[in-house]
Image: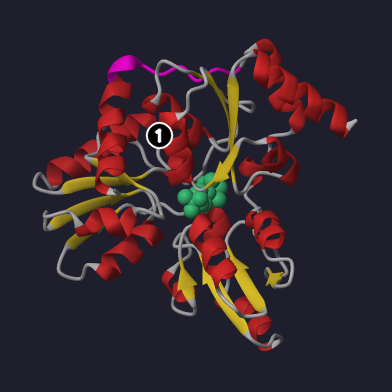
Amino acid sequence: MEKDIKDQILKLKKEKNAIILAHYYQIPEIQDIADAVGDSYYLSEIARDCKESVIVFCGVKFMAESAKILSPEKTVLFPVLDAGCPMADMANTADLIKLKNQHPKALTVCYINSSTEVKALCDVCVTSSSALKIMKKVDNQEIIFLPDRNLGGYIAEQFPDKKFILWEGFCPTHEKIEKESILKLKNSLEDVKILVHPECNKEIRNIADYIGSTSGIIKHATESTNKNYIIVTEEGVLYELKKSNPNKNFHVIDSGMICNNMKKTTLEDVYGSLLNMQNEIILDEDTRIKAHRALMNMHEMAR
Ligand code: 13P
Ligand code: SF4
């Protein structure tokens, strides 16, 4: 049955000249049928450069919207329309306009985990894998960063001479992790490294052996020689980690780290969306053009 639907998706993909993009947090079945699996930066580059006329984006809404911002001539299908990112929803344009008015000299930097409307008000976007490289190229002394106070705090720590005005947003999946549960797990293991996503708070970042994006975590574990790794990000990354490193052990804390929105997309959703060409991302063109500038600046500055 699963093979049937996979075959049908692959057939439809050819007929419709489509590419399937999936984030590392997607369920394994979705990662298996994708043409590209990656972190949000990598997927934004593929969406910008791919030759196919249809993109099926398996991830959360800001990712599919970013694909459409970068490739307005392509049809971007988003199989589950209500797969949002609670952190992105924590930033709104009215409060951002007020904050910008209070700090007229500040550069406004937004995490790609934000709506198209918020991006349209920002100077440059960043992802967790590109943020430090981009910030090194910024001359401004004052930076408004939104919506993630944790990624923002992590960046601010690396640039102590700059003044950061941080939005109070956070990722519920990464924020709920407790230091004690990681340390307990660490004490039960030998030859272990703790790999942490920068969406975790400072207390967790402080006990990390490595801090980086989903692709950074996978690369670091793959290049390290340790036997055991505690993975402090959404559990979807375990699929790629285990595939690439069959002789290493990957551990997560007992209570788990799941992003419910990332788990919503099923093979049936992808099939239905492609078959009927439904759940297309449509953006207001004026807003898209403004948001495009922030994403293009990201690609330019991350080079
Ligand atoms: P990455 O860019 O590291 O894949 O992160 C995306 C995300 O939403 C993490 O929660
Ligand atoms: Fe958003 Fe957190 Fe889910 Fe990433 S893990 S998509 S930041 S809610």
Question: What residue lies at 13% left-to-right and 48% top-to-bottom?
Answer: 103
Q: Residue furthest left?
A: 105
Q: 7 or 115: nearer the eye?
A: 7
Report x, y in % for residue 139. Answer: 11, 55
Front position in the image: 151 or 272? 272
| Colour scheme of the rendered structure | secondary structure
Q: Is residue 157 above or below residue 127?
A: below
How many marks do you count on the picture?
1
Residue in the foreground of this view, choosing between 230 and 121: 230
In the rendered image, which quarter is residue 91 located in?
top left
- Residue at position x 32%, y 35% from top? 118
Magenta region, main secondary structure: loop
Q: Say if the magenta span includes residue 285.
A: yes
Q: Residue 265 vs residue 280: left or right? A: right
Tag 1: Cα neighbours inside 10 Å, few (<14), some, or many (≥20)? many
Name the side, left or right, on which 136 lies relative to 249: left
Q: Quadrant of the N terminus?
A: top right
Q: Which residues are magenta?
A: 279-286
On the image, the x and y values in percent for residue 132 come to 30, 60
* Residue 114 placement: quadrant: top left
Task: Identify the residue under disc 1.
Answer: 115
Give amino acid for label 1.
Answer: Ser
Q: Residue furthest top?
A: 276
Where is residue 275? Give x, y as percent: 70, 14
Question: Which secondary structure lies at badge 1?
Answer: loop
215 lies above or below 290: below
Q: Is 217 inside the magenta-drawn segment? A: no
Is residue 71 or residue 179 the one in the foreground? Answer: 71
Q: Is residue 183 visible?
A: no
